Image (tube, grey):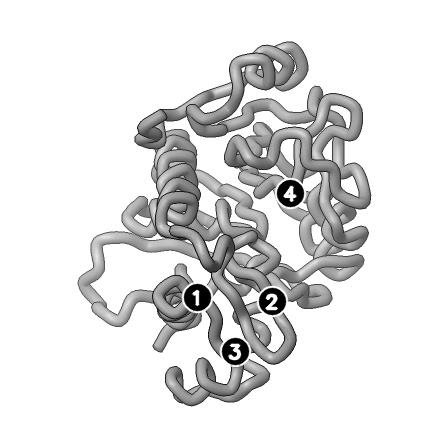
Amino acid sequence: MLVTERRERILALVRERGTLPLSELASTLGVSDMTVRRDIDLLAEDGEVQKVRGGVRAIGAGRPVSGAATASRSELRAIASAAADLVEPGMAIGISGGEAGLALAHELRGIADLTIVTNSLLVSDLFSPPSRSDAPYTQTVVLTGGVRTPSQSLVGPVAVRALEQLHCDLVFLDAHGLDVQAGLTTMNLLEAETYRAFMAMAREVIVLAEHSRWQVVGLTTIAELSDIDRLISDDALPADAAGQLRDHVGRLDVVAAGHSG
């Protein structure tokens, strides 16, 4: 079972049961407790589940969880699809770690002759050479080194040094938080340094951010909003937030994500 498939299975089990012990998840999936714990760390960091002592709980357990979860997946898919429309065969692109970056990677698998620079182990795995020799596309992955985070991204000085030698047409960054005063933020100091290196190698910096990232302030600032060439968000972004973002970022694209109201 692929890493992404295993995590989708964990999400499905947790949403179905509400709360599950790690040991039961490990047994069900046929993997070690340590593997499950890493998966849960990533899912919790991305807001998909909540860690509890010895186990994991669905977000909003005790009330319907499918609505919020489905909305979040719909938003990511819509944002990733809009971002993929900007990518053309033959480009060199950067994709950061994070849920939005992984969603984008899924959308790009059919585009020919791409060079993908990433610090995400999950994105790198997704672009592994296809098993079929007659597959109609070719893609090259450049994976940075660095210190691994719970979300399976590589950050820190080694990653920065690798990125400093490279140039990309487009760089896509996942956003932990966006705020007028704080700018683009993250909770990880080493990740901030790595994101800045991604931005420095880009002809165009594109940030992928669901509406829920607005007015979230992480521990440290990566860059000012004015350093973002294009921001792609979903149509649940409040009108006043959209107005403020348009005043600061180079361009704001708001995409329809199928919200019912």
Q: Residue at x 45, y 85 (%)?
A: 24
- Which quadrant, please, contains the C terminus? top left
In 3D space, how far apart are the residues under numbered discs 3 and 4 (Cα atoms)? 23 Å
In 3D space, how far apart are the residues under numbered discs 4 and 2 (Cα atoms)? 19 Å
In the rendered structure, which amino acid carries the disc numbered 2? Lys
Secondary-structure class at tag 2: strand
Mark 3 nearby-residue class (10 Å; few <14, some 14–19, many ≥20): many
Q: Is residue 26 left or right of residue 151?
A: left
Q: Which mark is residue 51?
A: 2
* x and y, in percent, of residue 251 in the image: 55, 17
Mark 4 or mark 2, earlier in chain: 2
Which residue is identified by label 3? 36
Mark 3 or mark 4, earlier in chain: 3
Q: Nearer the viewer, residue 117 or 69?
A: 69
Residue 148 visible? The answer is yes
Q: Residue at x 40, y 72 (%)?
A: 6
Q: Is residue 255 left or right of residue 217?
A: left
